[in-house]
Amino acid sequence: MALLSKFRNLFQAPSAPAAPLPIIDPTGHLPERRVRPRLNARPDLRIVVIDDSATVCAALRKILQSIGLNVRIAGDAENGLAMVMADPPDLIFLDIVLPQMNGFSALRVLRRNALTRAIPVIMISGNEQATEQFFGSAIGADDFMKKPFSRLEVFERIERLLDEQHVPRRKTPMTMPAPLGS
């Protein structure tokens, strides 16, 4: 057997050297993994997540709270709208497919109300159809995020909406063309 092991070792590729350990600076921090620095939202911002998936809500809560954001969760559009009307947030993540009232209907309610019209809304859906994205933007969605999403994607979507004070703001609202024949 020993002879067979030696013979096998002759023809095996040399084992790869172990990956180097990350260099730790004297303060004990690991080196930055990001390619570019992240532009964080102001840590006291209030976010409402409206989604009927407990998994999605838990993931968004964990991601958003990791940078100090205050997150409230609603499992359906009706409770989400009540929450938003009672205490308007700085940003809303709104699922499209919800029980009873869908996300598009909830978005219409938000855009018609003077209290909530200026709140940025990021629509989320497991379906990446271009029609959903177009319809969402046509009725006032500020961005669209497909499920499943990554932590990086959540931060990128928020970054797109940040103003100079690091607060999410709606960009110039899309104006709808007048109906033909008017």
Image (cartoon, rainbow, N blue to C red):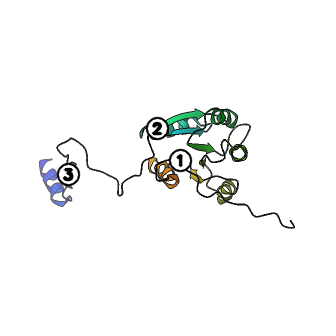
21 with respect to 41 (left or right): left
Residue 125 visible, this angle: no
Q: In the image, what residue occupies the spot 49% across and 52% down?
A: 162
Mark 2 residue element? loop
Q: In the image, what residue occupies the spot 69% across and 47% down?
A: 111
143 is higher (above) or lower (below) than 114: below
Query: Which amino acid does the dot numbered 1 rest on?
Result: Pro
Percent position of residue 146, x then y: 57, 51
44 with respect to 171 (left or right): left
Residue at mark 3: 20
In depth, the one of 139 and 119 nearer the eye is 119
On residue 44, the disc is 2
* Residue 84: quadrant of the picture: top right
152 is higher (above) or lower (below) than 64: below
Q: Nearer the viewer, mark 2 or mark 1?
A: 2
Query: Which amino acid does the dot numbered 2 rest on?
Result: Asp
Q: CA distance from mark 1 to mark 3?
A: 32 Å
* Residue 132: quadrant of the picture: bottom right
Query: Which amino acid does the dot numbered 3 rest on?
Result: Pro
| Crowd around label 3: few <14 · some 14–19 · many ≥20 (10 Å) | few
Percent position of residue 86, x then y: 64, 32
Q: CA distance from mark 3 to mark 2?
A: 38 Å
Residue at mark 1: 148
Percent position of residue 110, x then y: 69, 44
